[in-house]
Amino acid sequence: MTVGLRNKFIGDKAFYKMVLTVAVPIMVQNGITNFVGLLDNIMVGQVGTEQMSGVAIVNQLMMVYYLCVFGGLAGAGIFTAQYFGQGDNEGIRHTFRYKFWMALVLTAGAATLFLTVGGELIQMYLYGSSDGGDLQAALQHGKDYLKVMLFGLPAFMMVQIYVSTLRECGETVVPMKAGVAAVAVNLCLNYLLIYGKLGLPALGVVGAAVATVVSRYVEVSIVMIWTHVHRKKNPYIVGMYRTLKVPPALAGKYFVKGAPLLVNETLWSAGMAMLTQCYSVRGLSVIAGLNIANTINNMFNVVFIALGDAVAIIVGQLLGAGKMKEARDTDNKIIAFSVASCIGVAIFMVFIAPLFPQLYRTTDEVKAVAVQFIIAQAIFMPQAAFMHATYFTLRSGGKTIVTFLFDSVFVWCVSVPVAYILSRLTAVPVILIFAMVQAADWVKCIIGFILVKKGVWLQNIVARQT
């Protein structure tokens, strides 16, 4: 490697310390959350394949809501990071209030949808063969799980408003601690309520849902109390609720900048749900196997997800401060670091692929499908790391229309048609369908590389705001 390339893509110790200071707390929080989700999944999987499949389907549907909220808040979050870089506390208050109204509308809409057609949405995934278990039993378990999970939506909404704002203002440790406390509660209640320990009733999937809901209220309580108690560290929170009004001109700017992100996350998550539905027509064993693979994959995805958040936070603040050259240099190094890290993670995933599915009480067929999916996900992880980092690079500079085209439009115009046609009109094995869908993302990698290199994202979008 030449000196020039080394200087471009590899930082010094101070650089990595700075990046890891931001990324590691996010990794820890997401990692612990996903680890408890993994244990939760294994616990439900010990009850039966139908229970595991029903819960997996509902979680896939709930993910659409989660990402809608994420996308709805992300547009205002771009401004928050740059306001923080300028030291503009009033600007942060405006974005916080905008987030509240956006999240409230999305949560109300999701609750209405799940209450009215939740059963029909679950049924969409249960038209395949029943080789992995009883389809009607899986449907009923999914409905039972969904009913309880709806009670946790308000807590999730408020957690996202507070945690996103804290992170955009450089505070990542407190959300991590709140997440740790929440998952500890979740884990304990899972054990007690799923299996019926210490004299409590064995509630199965309902117990898993109750544990999740309670843990979310624990998390939001910790985050909100800390934020309001530590006013010197969070000066923007002073007077936050004196009014919930957002100046119309600013609300319009946030909406215009954030609408593509909201639409993007909605369409992207719906696209992911549709891809899963395409795979599911090959049988319940595919749903169960993919669920097992996704559980362990989520554990390792925290690396590139946290580094993507680091791009949004660090690069966004540099752009807000007008440090364009430093922003480009920092971005190059974080992207390289993310891809290199995920190559190592992918190798480890391949190694454990045959071992992890053995933790589940399910059929050999389901376990074999899970092994194939885990290996495929590992192979494509470095690619996912690069795409994630380039996405957040473009987003940090306010290029939300570009990210919309880059992400969800591609999913619906390329990924979903490929999966739909191959799953319904051919006899291609499901694992090859999955691999072909992932390979199609090479086009996104090329586009992302070109856009980042051209520097179209190097702009300060709050420079003239007061």
Image (cartoon, rainbow, N blue to C red):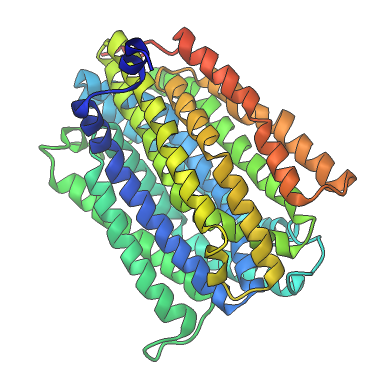
Q: Quadrant of residue 403?
A: top right
What residue is at 47 percent from the left and 11 percent from the top? Answer: 453
Q: State which quarter of the image contains the C terminus.
A: top left
What residue is at 73 percent from the left and 28 percent from the top? Answer: 413
Residue situated in front as seen by the camera: 86 or 449? 449
Q: Quadrant of residue 90?
A: top left
| Image mark count | 0
From the viewer's perspective, is residue 322 above or below residue 284? above
From the viewer's perspective, is residue 308 above or below residue 452? below
What residue is at 32 percent from the left and 44 percent from the top? Answer: 26
| In-image side of 229 versus 40 (left or right) | left
Q: Quadrant of residue 230?
A: top left
Q: Is residue 162 visible?
A: no
From the viewer's perspective, is residue 77 above or below residue 53? above
Residue 320 in the image: state x and y as whole percent: 29, 16
Q: State which quarter of the image contains the N terminus.
A: top left
Residue situated in front as seen by the camera: 165 or 111? 165
Q: Which residue is most to the right?
A: 425
Residue situated in front as seen by the camera: 312 or 70? 312
Q: Is residue 259 visible?
A: yes
What residue is at 42 percent from the left and 33 percent from the top? Answer: 340
| In-image side of 35 versus 126 (left or right) | left
Residue 50 in the image: state x and y as whole percent: 67, 72
| In-image side of 133 versus 266 (left or right) | right
Residue 225 in the image: state x and y as whole percent: 21, 52
Residue 16 in the image: state x and y as whole percent: 25, 31
Residue situated in front as seen by the camera: 39 or 394? 39
